[in-house]
Image (cartoon, helix red, strand yellow):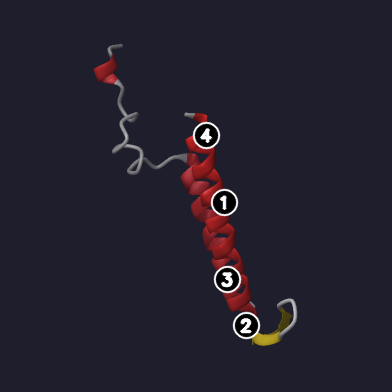
């Protein structure tokens, strides 16, 4: 196989491929969103000193977004170090 004949390894092709990992992550994301939006009652959350009352789904959504950003940042840092 020649280097020009490597289908799916170019940088532009990797975003269009549907892989089992992407399907699994999509299923997890949908289940996470269902769980978040099913929990709508008001809760008290203590943020170090102040106590905040907010819907549980907003707290869960904020936690999921912040976790995703931390994971993305850690993955990007790992990719840069391995090169």
Where residue 62 is drawn, which disc sits there?
A: 3
**Vertical relation: 68 (above or below) 82:** below
Label 3: which secondary element: helix
Label 4: which secondary element: helix
Q: Nearer the viewer, mark 2 or mark 1?
A: 1
Does the residue at mark 4 contact the one at mark 2 (Cβ under 8 Å)? no
Mark-to-mark CA distance, 1 and 3: 14 Å
Does the residue at mark 3 contact the one at mark 2 (Cβ under 8 Å)? no
Q: Earlier in the sequence, mark 2 or mark 1?
A: 2
Mark-to-mark CA distance, 2 and 1: 26 Å
Q: Disc 2 designates what residue? A: 40
Residue drawn 47% across the image and 46% down it: 22
Mark 4 burial class by Cα count in 10 Å: few <14, some 14-19, many 20+ = few
Mark-to-mark CA distance, 3 and 4: 29 Å
Q: How many marks?
A: 4
Q: Nearer the viewer, residue 2 or 47?
A: 47
Q: Position of residue 39 (x, y in %)?
A: 64, 78
Mark 1 burial class by Cα count in 10 Å: few <14, some 14-19, many 20+ = few
Does the residue at mark 3 contact the one at mark 4 (Cβ under 8 Å)? no
Does the residue at mark 2 contact the one at mark 1 (Cβ under 8 Å)? no
Q: Disc 4 designates what residue? A: 81
Q: Disc 1 designates what residue? A: 71
Q: Nearer the viewer, mark 3 or mark 2?
A: 3
Residue drawn 52% across the image and 42% down it: 77
> Image quadrant of residue 49?
bottom right
């Amino acid at each position: 196989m020649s280097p020009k004949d490597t289908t799916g390894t170019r940088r532009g092709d990797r975003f269009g491929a549907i892989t089992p990992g992407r399907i699994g992550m999509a299923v997890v994301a949908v289940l996470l969103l269902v769980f978040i939006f099913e929990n709508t009652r008001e809760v008290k959350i203590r943020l170090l000193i102040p106590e905040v009352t907010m819907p549980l789904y907003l707290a869960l959504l904020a936690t999921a977004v912040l976790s995703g950003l931390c994971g993305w940042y850690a993955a990007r840092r790992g990719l840069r170090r391995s090169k």
